[in-house]
Image: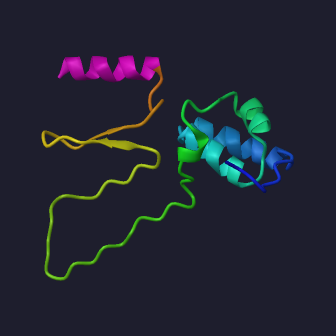
Amino acid sequence: MLEGVILDKQITQDWKDWIELNISRGCDKDGIYKILLDEGFSPIDIEKEMGYVPNVDVATIVNPLKTEQPTKFTKGVHSEKNQIFIPNARQIETELAELYTLHNFLNSEECDQVTELIKKK
């Protein structure tokens, strides 16, 4: 998985502040984890600092800072359908709707709040 990569970099206070800021902003924790891993921090240190362990194989997590969407140019073609890009999300294949899943997108309290809002409509 990470052969040849040295993972002994220490998490400085600047990095700790960055982690705290991005978690408080609601950023994807898997994405944060992957960024830190790619920066050379050890999984043990990352998990200790974040208080979080990804529920998916780390090799499948996309680093949101290194992800580039392919640019497609088609002359004379207009489409109302917008391409949606959500790092680490998986699209559900169905013709009925455009649906995506994102593991741990909402905590249980947030999920309950959204459910209640939907029921009120």
Bounds of the magenta span?
Answer: 108-121
Residue at the outermost bottom position? 75
What colour scheme was applied to this rendering of the protein?
A: rainbow
Residue 80 horizontal/vertical position (percent): 15, 61
Count all numbered tags in the image, as a single digit.
0
Q: Is 28 situated left or right of 22 in this image?
A: left
Q: Position of residue 73 (x, y in %)?
A: 27, 78
User: Can residue 99 be seen here?
Assistant: yes
Depth check: 11 or 2 in front? 2
Residue 25 visible? The answer is: no
Which picture quadrant has residue 57? top right
Residue 111 location, quadrant: top left
- Residue in front for this viewpoint, 72 or 20: 72
Rendered residue at 78%/55% (across/down): 5
> Camera-side residue: 65 or 95?
95
In the rendered view of the protein, which quadrant contains the C terminus? top left
Q: Residue at x 36, y 72 (%)?
A: 71
Left or right position of 21 against 55? right
**Which residue occupies 78% across, 34% down?**
44
Q: Where is residue 54 in the image (x, y as percent from the top left)?
A: 59, 33
Q: Is residue 113 magenta?
A: yes
Q: Where is residue 9 in the image (x, y as percent from the top left)?
A: 85, 50
> For this view, does 68 lie left or right of residue 52?
left
Verify whether residue 71 appears in magenta.
no
Q: Main secondary structure of the magenta part?
A: helix
